[in-house]
Amino acid sequence: MTTPVYQNFINGHFLKNQSGDTFAVKNPATDEVIYHVEVADAFVQNAAIESAKQGFAAWSAMTPIERSRILLKAVEILRARNDELAKIEVLDTGKPWQEAECVDVQTGADVIEYFAGLAPAQVGQQQMVGEDFYYTRKEPLGICAGIGAWNYPLQIACWKSGPALAAGNALIFKPSEETPLGAIKLAEIFIEAGVPAGVFNVVQGAAEVGQWLTQSDDIEKVSFTGEVGTGKKVVASAAGSLKDVTMELGGKSPLLVFDDADISQAVSAAMLGNFYTQGEICTNCTRIYVHKNVYQQFIDELKTRTEQNIIAGDPMDPEVNLGALISKNHHDLVMGYIDKGINEGATLLTGGKALKPESAPNGYFVAPTVFTDCTDNMTIVKEEIFGPVMSVLVFDDEDDAIRRANDTHLGLAAGVFTKDIKRAHRVIHQLQAGICWINSYGNSPAEMPVGGYKQSGIGRENGIETLDHYTQTKSIYVGMTDIESPF
Ligand code: NDP
């Protein structure tokens, strides 16, 4: 059976490349090639820039409220096509349908809706300086680039295009080579909604296409989601043309469970923050610090619920709540970390093996895995694994737990479970992380800014401040009096 071949989406339509180069995309749950995609060669890249220039000219000339109206139409279409788009995400990523059906498209649409609403409200300043005055205008940057990871492909494309487009920019987006289809669908939806051609172009390919975006002199900003190591390369490359950057990178986030916490709730948070999307979430709380007084109760309940409540299998089965990892390579990487955990002396509480569910025997599944008896210097406690692997550690002193939680070069997220309201805030205020939860974990509404401390990122996505990252301030001084000149 022949599989479809998707071309790059440029200037409102599909554009055939000249090199003829393509790459294959596999369904991680079946190991089967589901379609091919053309690589963005030099011809496509030039076309992407040229059309973005024209798209930008038309789009930035519209009033914010006109742009808002069009973006809200796109939101409506996204929501109406939820199931079709969610299915694409399941087939591309291997994540469970029960997640994609209610999260991926919805949270993407929410962010476009949020910024569409906000854009007309963005105002400049005016101030008198003597008899003269100045005013400021919030102007778009121009052509921006978005580079996405594979775990939430459509959501990431929405989170980057929402503020970029609302502020009047054009965006050239490169999805991960593993998950290229969602962004194409978004591009079609923008066109259907009335976004001018060239405002949202999708270029396809691996690192070299990403590198081209980071180097191009025609691009003013790059918003990147991916690994810390790749992020450093992107920043270095973007420095060549002094591009603005937003970096949404990896984490190794701590969750602190105090002895007055609701333990069942804390177990729910730990499971969500390690096994949702089969552990492939940047904010996951992969280091769980549990107070020694409740440690046994915590791991007893965690083991029972992990072994009884998780169903791996064909991700399209609505009962399945643990999907396949993105690729064979990533599967092997995660299994390698599990081996390291065992070899370095951690105790396997549960899991620790590859799975071959009956309904998806060729998928890249890894059992939900919990290590106990972990120490702070173990590889599994220090490095981001990006799979369903949780490390549980014990503490008995608040200050010590905070010190250990902060002892990492990463700082994406953190959480605290306690019923003591003063302790909750005292502890959270000392944790070095950009996204924090108290008696909760993982929720990320459009209204809330998200981004990392330390090496987990630069800048923020979502929330009011993000619109500022997609505009630049022009100051205009107006002389009302005669110029005093010594010449
Ligand atoms: P990668 O860093 O491997 O890739 C991210 C994107 O960058 C992909 O589109 C990739 O292309 C592209 N890319 C690779 N090399 C370069 C380069 N030199 N220049 C420009 N672009 C390049 O990340 P993953 O896709 O593996 O995603 C997982 C990572 O993303 C995890 O570390 C996770 O924590 C992080 N992440 C962070 C989030 C956040 O908001 N903080 C959210 C989601 C994930 P290709 O894949 O096609 O090779």
Image (spheres, grey):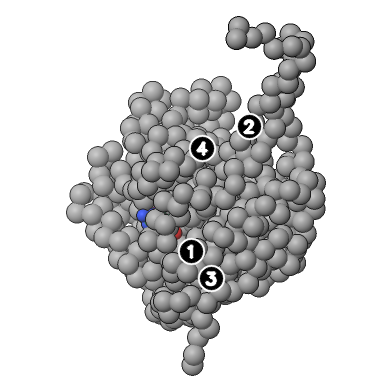
Q: What separation in Å lies between label 2 and label 4 (alpha carbons)?
A: 17 Å
Q: Looking at this view, is 63 or 80 the one in front?
A: 63
Residues under numbered marks 1 and 2 in contact, where contact means CB atoms less than 8 Å apart: no
Whole-angstrom CA distance, mark 1 to mark 4, is 27 Å
Label 2: state its secondary structure: strand
Q: Are marks 2 and 4 in contact (CB under 8 Å)?
A: no
* Disc 1 element: helix
Query: In the rendered view, would you say 410 is above or below 162?
Result: above
Q: Label 3 amino acid?
A: Asn
Residue 395: x %, y % from top left: 36, 32
Dividing the image into four quarters, tell me where ligand 1 lies. bottom left
Q: Amino acid at mark 1?
A: Gln
Which three-letter amino acid code belongs to the residue tagged 4? Answer: Gly
Give the x, y percent position of residue 58.
Answer: 71, 54
At 63% across and 32% down in the image, what residue appears? Answer: 473
Q: Please give the residue where the numbered disc 3 appears in the rendered image.
A: 8
Badge 2 or badge 3: first in the primary sequence: 3
The reply to whether residue 41 is in sight is yes
- Badge 1 density bin: few <14, some 14–19, many ≥20, Cα 10 Å: many
Mark 3 vs mark 4: in front: 3
| Pointer 2 residue | 473
C-alpha separation, residue under disc 1 versus residue under disc 2: 29 Å
Disc 2 beta carbon < 8 A from ligand 1?
no
Residue placed at 65% from the left, 26% from the top?
Answer: 475
Disc 1 target residue: 45
